[in-house]
Image (cartoon, rainbow, N blue to C red):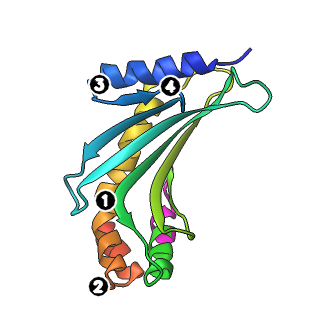
Amino acid sequence: MGVTIAQATSAVDKMLKGNEYKFSYDQEKNRFQITFNLRKTKLSSCRIYIHIEEQVRDPNLCKCIISYGYASISADSDCMAAIAEYLTRANYGLQIGNFELDHSDGEIRYKVACRVMESLPNNDALEDLIDMPVAMFNRYGNGLLAVSMGMVSAADAIKQAEGE
């Protein structure tokens, strides 16, 4: 049969409440929103949207749960190529999620997805939807700022972010 949209929504809701997070839920968009302060970077916060995606063949069934994390930074045309290089270097070797860059408007986000077809993901996988974007902006945020301001090359910023 598969996992229903209601079951997936309930699982995310339960995980968020279980961790005592303050969040909002937009039923029309079937989307949760939560914001975290970032502590290890000069970026101030990470806003996370968790979407419950429906299957094309049956809109009552869930295909996947996707989170998108956004920090208050974007790439303008002057630094787009350098930011793209930095994010590509950051993505190399990541196991859970990835950075994305929208070349049309400079939006930067971190995406994590859990496939949900026949069974719900466990609580650890659901927590990754939140933990990973926050951790990645904490780790790579200062480099994003430095590269966007032209203060350092993408390669050097990655070395700093990854402690090399």
Viewer-nearest residue: 105 or 3: 105
Viewer-nearest residue: 85 or 73: 73
- Secondary structure under tag 2 reads loop
| The magenta segment | 88-95
Q: Earlier in the sequence, mark 4 or mark 1?
A: 4
The residue that mark 3 highlights is: 19
Which is in the foreground here, disc 4 or disc 2?
A: 4
Instruction: Give the residue type that dot 4 points to.
Output: Gln
Q: Inspect this view and state whether residue 5 appears.
A: yes
Which is in the foreground here, disc 4 or disc 1?
A: 4
Which is in the foreground here, disc 3 or disc 1?
A: 3
Question: Is the Cβ of the residue at disc 4 closer than 8 Å to that at disc 2?
Answer: no
The single residue placed furthest to the front in the displayed view is: 28
- Label 3 environment density (alpha carbons within 10 Å; few <14, some 14–19, many ≥20): few
Instruction: Give the residue type that dot 1 points to.
Output: Arg
Instruction: Give the residue type that dot 2 points to.
Output: Met
Q: How many marks?
A: 4
Question: Is the Cβ of the residue at disc 4 closer than 8 Å to that at disc 3?
Answer: no
User: Does residue 149 appear left or right of residue 120 in this picture?
Assistant: left
- Secondary structure under tag 4 reads loop
User: Does residue 65 appear left or right of residue 42 in this picture?
Assistant: right
Instruction: Work out how far the residue at label 2 is from the one at label 1, CA to CA, in angstroms.
Output: 18 Å
The residue that mark 4 highlights is: 27
Instruction: Work out how far the residue at label 2 is from the one at label 3, CA to CA, in angstroms.
Output: 38 Å
Mark number, residue 139 = 1
- Percent of width and height locating residue 63: 67, 31
Q: Quadrant of residue 86?
A: bottom left
Which is in the foreground here, disc 2 or disc 1?
A: 2
- Secondary structure under tag 3 reads loop
Q: Quadrant of residue 102?
A: bottom right
Residue under the image location 53 percent in, 29 percent down: 30
Mark number, residue 151 = 2
